[in-house]
Image (cartoon, grey):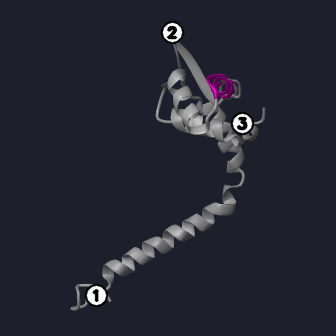
Amino acid sequence: MHAFEVLADPVRRRILELLAPGEMASGEVVEVIGAEFGITQAAVSQHLKVLRESGFATVRAEAQRRLYSVDAAGLQAVDAWIGRFRNFWEPKLDALATEIARGKRERRNAPITKRGGKRA
């Protein structure tokens, strides 16, 4: 399955969001996803399997528990593909950052009026 097909599913994106801070037991994932999306344990397990097989998640056994975490390899592949298009938005973001800094500097240097302590 292509990386963007994997990420197109809102359940799988949410699972990755849950796993982003660190490992999470499959039972915890099932509990959250089941409550949010109203799907069964079997359906959540299938989504976890897709994430694992496509390189977006890893699993390790700890006694009877299965602990899932994000596998950076899948996300790196997506980032590499998106990276080819960064030149379209980076100059605009740089210009925006410049304008924000200019506005902050102007507010900081603006004289304070005597009425209400507000700057002019």
| Eye-nearest disc, 3 or 1 | 3
Q: Earlier in the sequence, mark 2 or mark 3?
A: 3
Q: Position of residue 117 (x, y in %)?
A: 23, 85
Q: Which residue is mark 1?
A: 111
Q: Main secondary structure of the magenta part?
A: helix
Q: 87 or 30: which is nearer to us?
A: 30
Q: Which residue is mark 3?
A: 6
Q: Position of residue 54 (x, y in %)?
A: 71, 28
Number of numbered markers: 3
Residue 41 is a magenta residue:
yes
Query: For residue 77, which quarter of the picture?
Result: top right
- Height in image: 106 above or below 36? below
User: Would you call the spot at circle 3 few (<14 residues within 10 Å), some (14-19), or many (20 or more)?
Assistant: some
Q: Earlier in the sequence, mark 1 or mark 2?
A: 2
| Eye-nearest disc, 1 or 2 | 2
Residue 58 is a magenta residue:
no
Residues drawn in magenta: 40-48
- Height in image: 39 above or below 83? above
Pick the quarter of the image with the C terminus. bottom left
**Residue at image location 64% in from the left, 31% down from the top:** 39
Q: Which residue is mark 2?
A: 64
The secondary element bearing badge 2 is classed as loop
| Eye-nearest disc, 2 or 3 | 2
Q: Position of residue 30 (x, y in %)?
A: 56, 27
Is 28 placed left or right of 84 in the picture?
left
**Residue at image location 73% in from the left, 41% down from the top:** 4
Q: 19 or 44: which is nearer to us?
A: 44
The Cα atoms of the two marked residues, 3 and 1, are separated by: 54 Å
